[in-house]
Image (cartoon, grey):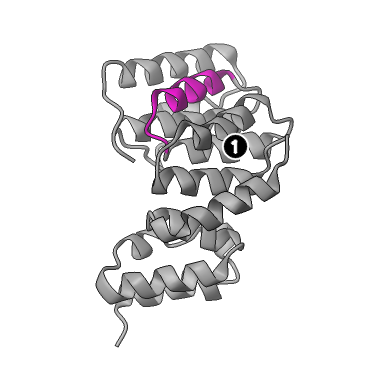
Amino acid sequence: MASAAFERFRFSFFEDKDSARQGLDTDALAALAGEERGLAEDMLLDHLPDTRGVIGLGILRSARAESALQALLEAANDPDVGREQIYLATALWQIRPDPGWLAPVTEALAAADEPLRRMAAAQALAAFGDPAAVRALTAALDDADGLVRHHAARGLLKLHGLPTPSDDYRHMIYRVMADAPETREAAKRDILAAIEGRAIGAQ
């Protein structure tokens, strides 16, 4: 009989029609062990090139998936670095950290025209335990879009092992979204002060 975690994983990754809005249950996937972990890996490999398969294989740090994910990333080859490439690069980094996987994500955060693409890059960089990710997220605290600034702040705190409360709208990760320059700058100073001197955690 399958564990509760496996059933939550299966529903979230393969059956939940609202998973794009609700978010995937990556905690359930990460909790799997033994035969269930191997079965989940097989299911996700069979689900490629679907984004849910890509994300799940990154969570599992699946060495078996590396060559397939790399081939998908090379095939995408979009000079503007789309969301598909961001997900692929993130999964590859989780499997085997390499500067080559980090570069397209930092590039997307710095240069993508669409705020949603920059936001996706900022969210992804929270998984990249590397000084280059910290530099890119720090620069994004000055992004023109409030949501990009918010996710850059969250990523910086997460990389440095700090909490990111979801219900305190006075917190610096929300104040950095403000339109008022003085509020935004004060929040930025608070964020940088919070991470100063802290080591980057393993992701």
Q: Which residue is at 58% across, 41% downward?
A: 120
Q: Is residue 17 above or below residue 51?
A: below
**Quarter of the figure with residue 8:** bottom left
Task: Name the image quarter holding the N terminus.
Answer: bottom left
Q: Position of residue 179 (x, y in %)?
A: 62, 21
Residue 4 colored in magenta in the image:
no
Q: Nearer the viewer, residue 54 or 174?
A: 54
Mark yes or no: residue 148 visible. yes
Q: Is residue 13 above or below residue 92?
A: below
Q: Position of residue 129 (x, y in %)?
A: 37, 33
Q: Secondary structure at mark 1?
A: helix
| Image side of residue 38 versus residue 92, left or right | left
Residue 135 colored in magenta in the image:
yes
In the picture of the structure, the residue carrying the numbered disc 1 is 119
Disc 1 residue type (three-letter): Met
**Quarter of the figure with residue 19:** bottom right
Q: Position of residue 193 (x, y in %)?
A: 34, 15
Mark yes or no: residue 170 visible. no
Q: Which residues are magenta?
A: 128-142
Q: Which residue is at 53% across, 43% downward?
A: 89
Q: Nearer the viewer, residue 42 or 175?
A: 42
Q: Which residue is at 60% across, 71% downward?
A: 17
Q: Position of residue 123 (x, y in %)?
A: 51, 39
